[in-house]
Image (cartoon, helix red, strand yellow):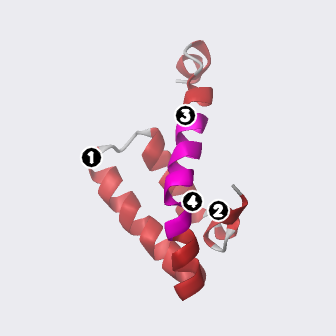
Amino acid sequence: MTAHLKELNLTVLFSSNAGSRLSEIRSRLVNLHQRGGENAVRAHLREELASIEADHKNSWTTAMYRAAVSSDWFCNGGFDNF
């Protein structure tokens, strides 16, 4: 797996894709955080993760949502720093 990531330069592609996705959902996360704080953001991210994970268990999108859900920093407004 690591060899594929390096050989195909997938880390650059995946991080670029994740950055684009975060830009797309940023305003929604800001609104959720303003209305319900960290818990509202985490609940939304968990719902998105469950939906995506059902069809794409090993995708970069699933990995991004898993990381976001597990990050207290991100759920408490860290997304606003992108």
Disc number lying in front (1 or 3): 3
Q: CA distance from mark 4 to mark 2?
A: 9 Å
- Mark 4 packing: few (<14 Cα in 10 Å), some, or many (20+)? many
Tag 3: amino acid: Phe
Residue 23 part of the magenta-drawn span: yes
Circle 3 is placed at which residue position? Answer: 14
Please identify the quarter of the rendering in which residue 59 is found. top left
At 56% from the left and 61% from the top, the residue drawn is 26
Residue 37 part of the magenta-drawn span: no
Q: Are marks 1 and 3 in contact (CB under 8 Å)?
A: no
Q: Earlier in the sequence, mark 2 or mark 3?
A: 3
What span is in magenta? 15-28
Disc number lying in front (2 or 1): 2
Q: CA distance from mark 2 to mark 3?
A: 17 Å
Tag 1: amino acid: Asp
Circle 1 is placed at which residue position? Answer: 55
| Nearer to the camera, 29 or 68 | 29
Q: Earlier in the sequence, mark 4 or mark 1?
A: 1
Q: What SS does tag 3 mark?
A: helix
Q: CA distance from mark 1 to mark 3?
A: 18 Å
Residue 52, relative to residue 58: is it above or below?
below
Q: What SS does tag 2 mark?
A: helix
Which mark is on residue 79? 2
| Quadrant including the C terminus | bottom right
- Mark 1 packing: few (<14 Cα in 10 Å), some, or many (20+)? few
Q: Earlier in the sequence, mark 4 or mark 2?
A: 4
Q: Is residue 54 left or right of residue 15?
A: left
Q: Are marks 4 and 2 in contact (CB under 8 Å)?
A: yes
Tag 4: amino acid: Ala
At 55% from the left and 53% from the top, the residue drawn is 22
Tag 2: amino acid: Phe
Circle 4 is placed at which residue position? Answer: 68
